[in-house]
Amino acid sequence: MGKQKMTYGEFYGYYLSQHQKPMNRVFHFLGIFFTFWILIYIIYSGQERFFWYLPLTLLALPAFGHVFEKNTPTGIKAPVRTLMSDFRFFFELISGKEKFRPKNDNIIR
């Protein structure tokens, strides 16, 4: 990521280029899935003590995925855009727009 200001579309292309390995994608998917699951549980049960699980699911699982990618998580330099991209990526995986085993020809580098 350069020093110039990127548009969100450009950033998302960069984000996808940093998430090519299937295991990295799986850990990102699981992190967002469990985040939603915990939030729904907290809302319905009223047990706020489970809020402390959110950093584990929202940050630690996706960050661990980068061990397989052998790169640095994008959230270090652009945390808000990365969070937005994590959720977009999650819904694109569910809808089938993105695959767990990506083709490299649709990535902007």
Image (spheres, rainbow, N blue to C red):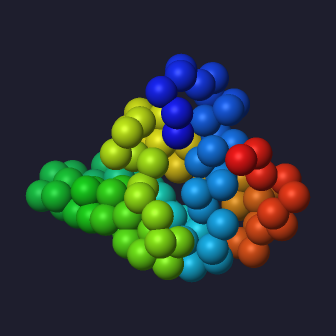
* Left or right, residue 1 beside residue 49: right
Query: Can I make out residue 30 in this image?
Result: no
Q: Quadrant of residue 66?
A: bottom left
The residue lying furthest to the front in this view is: 3
Indicate the position of residue 60 as horizontal and vertical percent values. Answer: 31, 65
* Left or right, residue 101 beside residue 22: right
Indicate the position of residue 85 as horizontal and vertical percent values. Answer: 56, 43
The residue lying furthest to the left in this view is: 49
Report the front residue among 93 and 40.
93
Report the front residue among 28 and 51.
28
Indicate the position of residue 68 as horizontal and vertical percent values. Answer: 49, 78
* Count of marks placed on residues: 0
**Which residue: 76% across, 45% down?**
108
Report the front residue among 93 and 14.
14
Q: Quadrant of residue 98?
A: bottom right
Query: Can I make out residue 64 in this image?
Result: yes
**Which residue: 59% across, 68% down?**
25
**Which residue: 48% across, 27% down?**
3
Indicate the position of residue 63 as horizontal and vertical percent values. Answer: 38, 64
* Left or right, residue 5 beside residue 38: right
**Which residue: 41% across, 36% down?**
78
Q: Quick check: 70 above or below 58?
A: below
Q: Quadrant of residue 34?
A: bottom left
